[in-house]
Amino acid sequence: MSVSASEAFFTPHSPLLHRRQRIRAGMNDLPLARLPRRVFRGTTSGVFCLLAACQGVPFLEGGRHQAGDRMFVGRVFHGEPIVGRTLVWIAWGDVPNDGASLQNYWYPADRLAVGVGVDRVAFRPPGGSVIGWEFESRLRYHGLDLGKIGLFADFNCGWMVTEHPIPPEGTRSNYTFSFGPGVEIPLKAGFSFLMGLEMHHWSNARGRYASDNPAQNEFFPWVGFGIPW
């Protein structure tokens, strides 16, 4: 009898079940298990501190992006699950994924952009694949511009819909949010190369302290290109 991708999580030999049992038994304290969170925390904290420290420096005034600018962004990304506690959230989802995004930004003020985006995500649970779509509202602040390279911070929230529950113990639709630092490198004709690192989370509404929360946290690197219009 065939087993669907979502049902595979519930079998006694599920890789997700075995990994979760190991983590709850204490393997989450190993340095390798903590590495994604350490990298993300260190990178995010350093960039946010740098953004804050650079405010008011004369050669940064105005920034690369001015009020009235618009930018279309295409990007690809990878989601690497962080099982257990991340920052203050506990989540046991463990489904790697990859995808692509289309985003549109408008700058109502210098340095500050608001935007919308849509992501197509391919999840890879044991035994198959699950396609999902995420619809986001986005906020971007460019805190540092040195001419050849710029640093920014992203804050996003949205809604995800999938073919099957992801994680399988959860639901087919979930609230999402993400935040993290990014880098912009100007190219010719106003084009930009962008890359970033986010902490991406979707919730299944059992609360951040629930020991069986089927939500998922992700270490979320991405690269893309920006096109002014």
Image: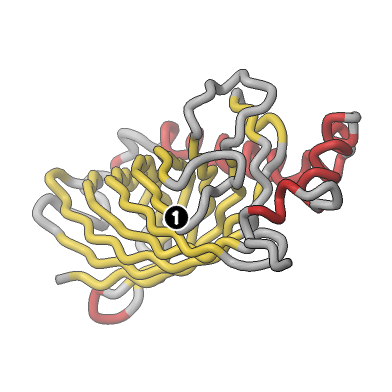
Pick the front one: 190 or 209: 209
Residue 56 place in picture, x, y as percent: 31, 34
Residue occupying the point 65% across, 39% down? 42
Coloration mode? secondary structure
Q: Quadrant of the N terminus?
A: bottom right
Residue 227 place in picture, x, y as percent: 25, 72
In the rendered image of this protein, does residue 146 appear above or below residue 207? below
On the picture, is 72 further left or further right than 92?
A: left
Q: Quadrant of residue 225?
A: bottom left
Residue 85 place in picture, x, y as percent: 68, 29
Residue occupying the point 29% across, 56% down? 117
Residue occupying the point 68% across, 48% down? 94
Any part of residue 220 in sight? yes
Any part of residue 59 in sight? no
Residue at the outermost front position:
1
Label 1 Cα crowd, 10 Å radius (few <14 / some 14-19 / many 20+): many
Mark 1 = which residue? 162
Residue at the outermost left position:
68
Pick the front one: 89 or 214: 214
In the rendered image of this protein, does residue 212 appear above or below residue 217? above
Pick the front one: 127 or 102: 127
Q: How many marks?
A: 1
Q: Amino acid at mark 1?
A: Thr
Residue 194 place in picture, x, y as percent: 42, 65
Residue occupying the point 71% across, 55% down? 8
Element carrying mark 1? strand
On the picture, is 151 further left or further right than 216?
A: left
Pick the front one: 94 or 172: 172
